[in-house]
Amino acid sequence: MIDLKLDIPADIFDGEFPLAAFNDRMREVAILELVRSKRVHEHEALELLGIERRELLAKMKEHGIVPTENAFEAIKGELEKAIKTRATKK
């Protein structure tokens, strides 16, 4: 595992904005960004984040990341539409 270091002033953090919560959030965002960039698969993100699939899907939606099965369904729909359009032109 890689341990990233951020250069952020320590006085930003306090009881209302704790460092531990910020650290957890940054880890989550980093893993989601790795999913977006296709560097980590969704099943790997599940393991890294230690969450259920429905939670991952909700987080992905929140960050504008299309789940793999939705992307395949969209492609399948476009392909079917193109096939029908071509068939009607004959």
Image (tube, helix red, strand yellow):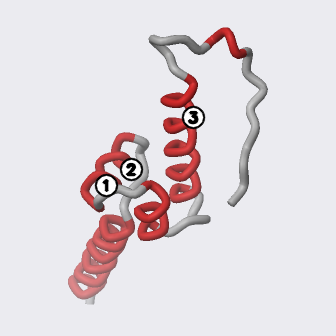
Q: Nearer the viewer, mark 1 or mark 3?
A: 3
Q: Position of residue 54 (x, y in %)?
A: 25, 57
Q: Are marks 1 and 3 in contact (CB under 8 Å)?
A: no
Relative side of 67 to 37, left or right? left
Mark 2 to mark 3 CA distance (whole Å): 19 Å
The amino acid marked with disc number 1 is Leu
Residue position for label 1: 57
Mark 1 to mark 3 CA distance (whole Å): 21 Å
Q: Position of residue 20 (x, y in %)?
A: 53, 30
Count of numbered tags: 3
Q: Nearer the viewer, residue 81 or 13?
A: 13
Q: Nearer the viewer, residue 47 or 35?
A: 47
* Image-quadrant location for residue 16: top left
Q: Position of residue 71 (x, y in %)?
A: 37, 66
Residue position for label 3: 23
Rendered position, 88 above or below 50: below
* Image-quadrant location for residue 68: bottom left
Rendered position, 3 above or below 90: above
Q: Nearer the viewer, residue 22 or 72?
A: 22
Residue position for label 2: 60
Q: Nearer the viewer, mark 2 or mark 3?
A: 3
Residue at the spot 36% in from the left edge and 61% down from the top edge: 67
Residue at the spot 44% in from the left edge and 54% down from the top edge: 49
Q: Quadrant of the C terminus?
A: bottom left
Residue at the spot 26% in from the left edge and 72% down from the top edge: 77
The amino acid marked with disc number 3 is Asn
